[in-house]
Image (spheres, rainbow, N blue to C red):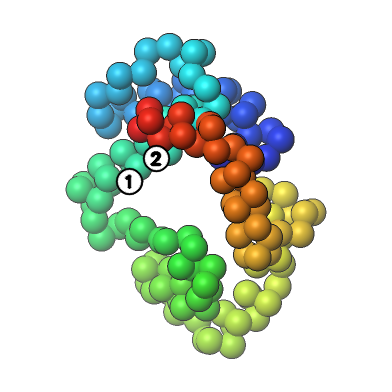
Amino acid sequence: MLGGADNPIDLKLNAPIRLRRLRRHCAAEVTDIAALSPGELAAMSWTCEAAIRASTMIAAPRRLLVVDFDGFLERPADGLAGLLAHFGLTSLQARIEETLAGPLMRTYSKDASFDYSPADRRAFLKEYKTTHAEEIRGGTALA
């Protein structure tokens, strides 16, 4: 959430919406989002989504499938088959492999004009942990 050039802008623009959503699911102590650092905004955003996921798991546990994205990237064929099964769909293994051989696993999901593989993601995350270490510590302290 801190890595891309536009991410801090996204965090600030969407903070009011995320805070309202968070307050619907739990008591949020945040009052002045303008005073939050990018790391704290990222933590609040993550907490918002985690609270929504937890509420959904309670309300409709069979409808929600929690996906460990790193695990999915390690075994994408198994992950895609599991996603299809969750929605009551089936596919031949060959079709799954064909899908995964296409641009799905080689481009950035938010902008397909950028090459972005699972290895690229791992490298960026490693870099971001160092580059944004102070913001990550601040966000972790808030959460």
Q: Quick one: 83 or 73, which is closer to the camera? A: 73
Quarter of the figure with residue 101: bottom right
**Position in image of residue 15 (x %, y %):** 49, 24
Q: Please determine whether, in this image, residue 26 is positioned above or below residue 78.
A: above
Q: Residue furthest left?
A: 58
Q: Residue furthest right?
A: 113
Alpha carbons under labels 2 and 1: distance apart: 6 Å
Residue at which label 2 appears: 49
**Position in image of residue 141 (x %, y %):** 38, 30
Q: Please determine whether, in this image, residue 51 is positioned above or below residue 142.
A: below
Q: Amino acid at mark 1?
A: Arg
Compared across the picture, whether 67 is left or right of 109 comes to left
Q: Residue at x 55, y 27 (%)?
A: 38
Compared across the picture, whether 72 is left or right of 19 comes to right
Element on which disc 2 rests: helix
**Position in image of residue 111 (x %, y %):** 72, 49
Q: Amino acid at mark 2?
A: Glu
Image quarter (top left, top right, bottom left or bottom right) of the N terminus: top right
Figure disc tally = 2
Residue 92, disc: none
The answer to whether mark 2 and mark 1 are in CB contact below 8 A is yes
Image quarter (top left, top right, bottom left or bottom right) of the C terminus: top left
Residue at which label 1 appears: 53
* Visible residue check, residue 129: yes
Compared across the picture, whether 13 is left or right of 117 comes to left
Element on which disc 1 rests: helix
- Within 10 Å of the Cα at label 2, are there few (<14), some (14-19), or many (20+) other Cα atoms? some
Q: Residue at x 32, y 46 (%)?
A: 53
Q: Please determine whether, in this image, residue 13 is positioned above or below residue 74.
A: above
